[in-house]
């Protein structure tokens, strides 16, 4: 089974960065904000880029995608899934696959009140609603158990004493909301330096060893991306 986990595709935006985006949104209140439907869809894409997509299977279900991808319309099946496929009701892999798939868009879209303001569709996002959506979406994120336990040794101790069942369970229930990474995401160091010039100075000052080091321990929680990701607007979510 082919899975797309290459640099330029896989990513995940931290919950803290999403909350900060809502907090600073125009017209935001202490409880949340009203955003456009396009902004809400963009928010959902922040989770979709962490979904494993079976490229060969996905394309076999829509043969016309081969032409679209070869013509440059999309970089990959994953790219299509993130931008359109999920919202069209497509699955990222076969139904018999043991991995959990994201909840259907028809379910997620019903989790938020939709308003019509000035003739435009708007969505009311509260902190509670955001957490509920995030909890559903991160269930499909694959966690590198060994890396997670090595990176966050406190979780390993918690498993040993029985308070946590696994790295995956911790990430889904608490880790994501505490800015833990599910795996060691590769950083495109040249892209990262160009995209975030302030990091270059912090590395020169000796605060961080490299772009990879910065991303793991600060950049991710700030909403920075490890590399350019197909289907995402990289500037919207960074709070740095």
Image (tube, rainbow, N blue to C red):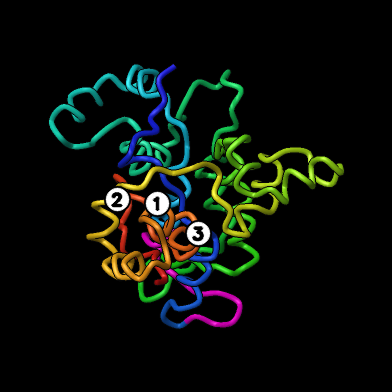
The residue range painted magenta reads 28-40
Front in this rendered view, residue 100 or 87: 100
**Residue 25: image location, x then y, percent:** 43, 76
Q: In the shown orientation, is residue 21 left or right of residue 153?
A: left
What residue is pinned by disc 2?
Answer: 189
Circle 1: is it few (<14), some (14-19), or many (20+) Cα within 10 Å?
Answer: some
Find the distance from the CA under tag 3 to the CA under tag 2: 15 Å
User: First in sequence: mark 3 or mark 2?
Assistant: 2
What residue is pinned by disc 3?
Answer: 217
User: First in sequence: mark 1 or mark 2?
Assistant: 2
Find the distance from the CA under tag 3 to the CA under tag 1: 9 Å
* Residue at x-position 68% and y-position 40%: 167
Circle 2: is it few (<14), some (14-19), or many (20+) Cα within 10 Å?
Answer: some
| Residue 59: in magenta span | no
**Secondary element at tag 2:** helix
> Quadrant location of the C terminus?
bottom left
**Secondary element at tag 3:** helix
* Residue at x-position 25% and y-position 26%: 65
User: First in sequence: mark 3 or mark 1?
Assistant: 1
What residue is pinned by disc 1?
Answer: 212
Circle 3: is it few (<14), some (14-19), or many (20+) Cα within 10 Å?
Answer: some
Can you say whether 82 is above or below 38 in the image?
above
**Residue 96: image location, x then y, percent:** 58, 18
């Amino acid at each position: 089974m082919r899975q797309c986990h290459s640099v330029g595709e896989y990513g995940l935006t931290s919950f803290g960065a999403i909350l900060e985006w809502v907090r600073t949104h125009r017209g935001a209140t202490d409880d949340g904000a009203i955003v456009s439907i396009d902004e809400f869809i963009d928010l959902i894409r922040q989770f979709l880029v962490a979904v494993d997509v079976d490229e060969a299977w996905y394309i076999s279900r829509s043969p016309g995608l081969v032409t679209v991808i070869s013509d440059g319309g999309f970089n990959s099946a994953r790219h299509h899934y993130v931008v359109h496929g999920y919202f069209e009701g497509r699955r990222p892999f076969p139904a018999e696959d043991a991995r959990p798939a994201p909840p259907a868009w028809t379910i997620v879209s019903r989790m938020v009140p939709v308003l019509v303001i000035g003739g435009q569709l708007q969505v009311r996002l509260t902190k509670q609603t955001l957490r509920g959506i995030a909890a559903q979406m991160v269930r499909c994120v694959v966690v590198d158990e060994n890396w997670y336990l090595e990176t966050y040794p406190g979780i390993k101790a918690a498993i040993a004493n029985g308070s946590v069942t696994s790295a995956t369970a911790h990430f889904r229930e608490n880790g994501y909301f505490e800015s833990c990474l599910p795996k060691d995401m590769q950083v495109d160091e040249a892209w990262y330096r160009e995209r975030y010039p302030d990091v270059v100075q912090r590395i020169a000052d000796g605060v961080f060893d490299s772009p990879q080091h910065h991303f793991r321990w600060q950049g991710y929680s700030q909403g920075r991306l490890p590399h350019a990701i197909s289907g995402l607007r990289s500037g919207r979510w960074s709070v740095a």
